[in-house]
Image: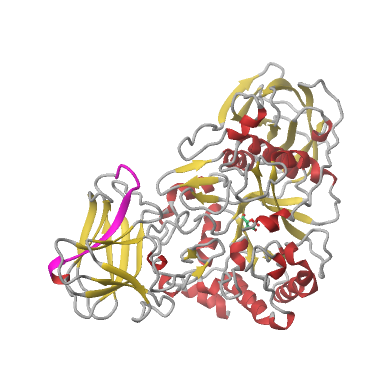
Amino acid sequence: MILQKLCLLGLFSPVAVRSLLTPPNALNLEITTNITHEIPSTLYGYMWEDINHSGDGGLYAELLQNRAFQGVIPGTQNALNAWQAHNGARLSVTSKTEGVSSALPNSLQVQIPKVVFGPVGFENTGYWGLKVQEGWTYNGSFYVKSDTYTGSITVSLKSSRGTVFASQTLTGVSNAWVKLTFQLTPTVSAANDDNVFSVILDGGAAAGQTLYFGMFSLFPPTFKGRENGMRIDLAEAMAATNPTVWRFPGGNNLEGLSFDTRWKWNETIGPLENRPGRVGDWSYPNTDGLGLLEYLNWAEDLGAEPILGVWSGISTANYSDLADWPIVPEADLQPYVEDVLNEIEFIVGNKSTKWGKVRASLGREEPYSLRFIEVGNEDQFQEDSYAAYRWSAFVNAISAEYPEMEFLATSFPSLALNPPYKRIDFHQYDSASFFETNAFFFDTYPRNGTKWFVGEYAVTSTNESNPLGLITQGRLQYPSLAGSTAEAAFMTGMERNSDVVFASAYAPSLQHIRNYQWTPDIISFDASRMVRSTSYYVQQMFSSNRGTHVLTTNPPSDSTSVPLYWVASYNNETEVVFLKVSNTGTDDLVGNIVLDFSTPGFATAISLGTPALSPISELFNISNTIDEPDQVIPVASSFSFQDPTRFNYTFPATSITVLAMQSLNFNNSG
Ligand code: AHR
C-alpha cells in the first residue's frame, strides 16, 4: 500500500569519491586522539508503530485476539475473527445488547442449541496460536451476562486436539454484566502453539440459553511484571539493543485512514474498558491496550528518550493517489492543535493542571520528561499545506506554552518552513548499494545547525530498479547479511557525522511472521518463537558499544578504494576506544591499525559475518529466519599484540566488526 509514496523518496545521492590510497586488500589505519565532536546520547533507538502485529499480538503481551470485538462490524463473519464455536454453539458479534462500557459496544452473543451432548462453548485461537508454558501463571478475565443462565463456566488452556493444560471453573453469572477473573497455571508445557483458550458452559443447564460475553483478557507473565505489560522475550530483545530514543506512535499508524480513525491519545488511556480501539492503518483493528501511558512507561524502562509524533492534520486514506489524501483545512485545524496541547499537558503537566491531574489519577503523579515533538509523519508527500499552515499552527501553539520543546519536521529537508525547522526526520528504504554509496552523505552535509533524525531506514530489496515495492520481486523477507553490512556502512557515516545526525532508527521494528504487512523487519516472531535478524545484531553492536566522542582517523573513511567503512570513537567514562567497521566486499581485508594512544596490549572484537560465498547475489540469501534463527550471530573474541600501539586485524568478507581497546594514556589532541 505504501509503494507509490516510497517511490517518491530519493533524497540522498551518490557523493562518495574514493581515491586509491592503499593496495586493494590492505589498509593502514591510524586512530588518532583528535576529537571532532561529542556523540549525542540519542543516536540509536527505535521507531515504533503498530504494524505487522508488532503491538497487538506482539510486544503487547495480551494473548487473546479480538478480545473486545473492537473495530469490527457486528453481524459479520469477520467480527468473529479468532473466535470459534465448540460443539454447536452459535456465535455472533452484536451491539444490540448494551456493551460492557460505552467505549466497547460490541459483545459476543452465544446461543446454545436446545439439544446438546457434552461440553459446549467457544474458543479463542490467539494471535495465530498460544504459547502454553509450564509454571507460568496466566491472569485472565471476561465479562458475562445472561437473563437465564446461572450455571458454571469452565475456562482452560488446551491444545486444539483437546489436551487440557490448565483450567478453572467459575460461577456468578447473572442478568447484569459481571467481570469474572481467573488464573491458569499449566503444569506442563504444550508441544507447540496450536492451542486455544476455551470457554465451556455446563451443557445440561445451558441448553437453549443465550449468554453475552465482552472484553476478554489473558496475560502471561510480563516484562518487569508490569500489569497490562509487554511480552518478555520481545521486550528483552528490544531492551538489549540499548536504545536511547523511542519514536511513537507512528509512522502511518499515527495518521489514520480518516481523520476520525487517527491515533487519538485520549482514547488510549485509563481502564481498558474505556478504550474503544480503532481501525489502524495496517489492515487490522488496534486494541489500544498499548496506549500513551504504556508507551511512556516502556520508554522509561528502556532508558530511551521519547520522540512524540503528533497528528498534523492529514490522513492516509487512499494510497493509490497521494494527492487525494484528506487534509484538514486551515480554518478547521484549531481543535486538533488544542488536542495536541492537551496531550502534551497530560504528559508533562504537573498534577494541578487539568490533564496532569488526569494522569495522576491514573497512577502517575510525576510528569514525564519530554523534549522532542515530531509534527506528523512523512509530510513531504503533502508539503504545500505543511509549509502553508500545518507545521506553523502546531509549532507556534506548542512553543507558546512549552518554549522548551524541540520540534522535528517531516517534510523534504529542502522545504522552507516558518518557523524554520531545526530538526528533521527523513526516511530511507532502499537497496544495499544505495546505503553503501551514501555512507558518506553526511560527511559533506552543510553544518548549518540542522539536526537529522534518520527515523526510518532499512535495506529492503535486492532489486536495484525497484527497491521499494512492498511485494515485488527482490523484496527481502528478512534482513540479509549483505543488506546489514550496507546498513552498517551507512551507520558508520551517521555516527561519524553525529554532530548532524542526532538520532536514528531501523524500521519497522517487529513482525508477526503469520500476519504482516511489511518486510523486512528487525525482529520476527510467532506466538512462542523469536528471531533476531542480522540487522538487529548490527543495531545492537553499534548501540551497545558507544563512544562519547568521535575520533578522526588517517586516512578518513571516505578515502580508500577498498569496501571498508569505519568510524572511531572514544568513551570518556570508560576510556575505551571503539573502531566500528563494515566490510561490504567479498574479500577478507587486512587492517594495519596504528593507535595514537597506548593500550594494555590486547583488544576485544565482536564480529558478525559468515564465510564469503560466491556469487555475491547469494549473500542476500543469508538471513536469520524463524526456523533458522542462529545462522549468523555475533562472535566475541579478544586478542593480544606485542606493541601496545599497533596490531593487524583481518576484517572478514561481508562482515561487521566492533573493536574495543582500553586506552591508557588518551590525550585529546584536537
Ligand atoms: O515503516 C513502515 C512505514 O514506512 C511507516 O509507517 C511510514 O512512515 C513509512 O512510509
Instruction: Indicate the quadrant containing the C terminus: top left, top right, bottom left or bottom right.
Output: top right
Determine the residue positioned at 40% across, 52% down: 128
Whether residue 596 appears in this view of the structure is yes
Of residues 270 and 530, the one drawn nearer to the viewer in this rendering? 530
The quadrant the N terminus occupies is: bottom right
Nearer-the-camera pick, 196 or 58: 196
* Residue located at (27% from left, 71% from top): 110
Residue 404 as seen in the image, left or right of residue 273:
right
Which percent across, then down, holds residue 475? 62, 44
Depth order, front residue of 576/41 = 41
Residue 580 in the image: x percent, y percent? 69, 34
Residue 174 in the image: state x and y as whole percent. Answer: 22, 78
Is any atom of residue 572 visible in this view? no
Instruction: Verify whether residue 109 appears in magenta.
Output: no
| Colour convention of the picture | secondary structure
| Residue toward you, 42 or 478 | 478
- Residue 275 pos. (x, y %): 46, 72
| Displayed-image quarter of ligand 1 | bottom right
Q: Tell me which segment is drawn in magenta.
A: 190-204
Q: Does 106 sit left or right of 3 as displayed?
A: left
**Number of marks in the image?**
0
Q: Residue furthest bottom?
A: 331
> In the image, what residue occupies the spot 83% across and 23% down?
22
**Vertical placement of 470 versus 346: above or below?**
above
**Picture layout, residue 561 above or below residue 626:** above
Residue in the picture at 62% in, 21% down: 639
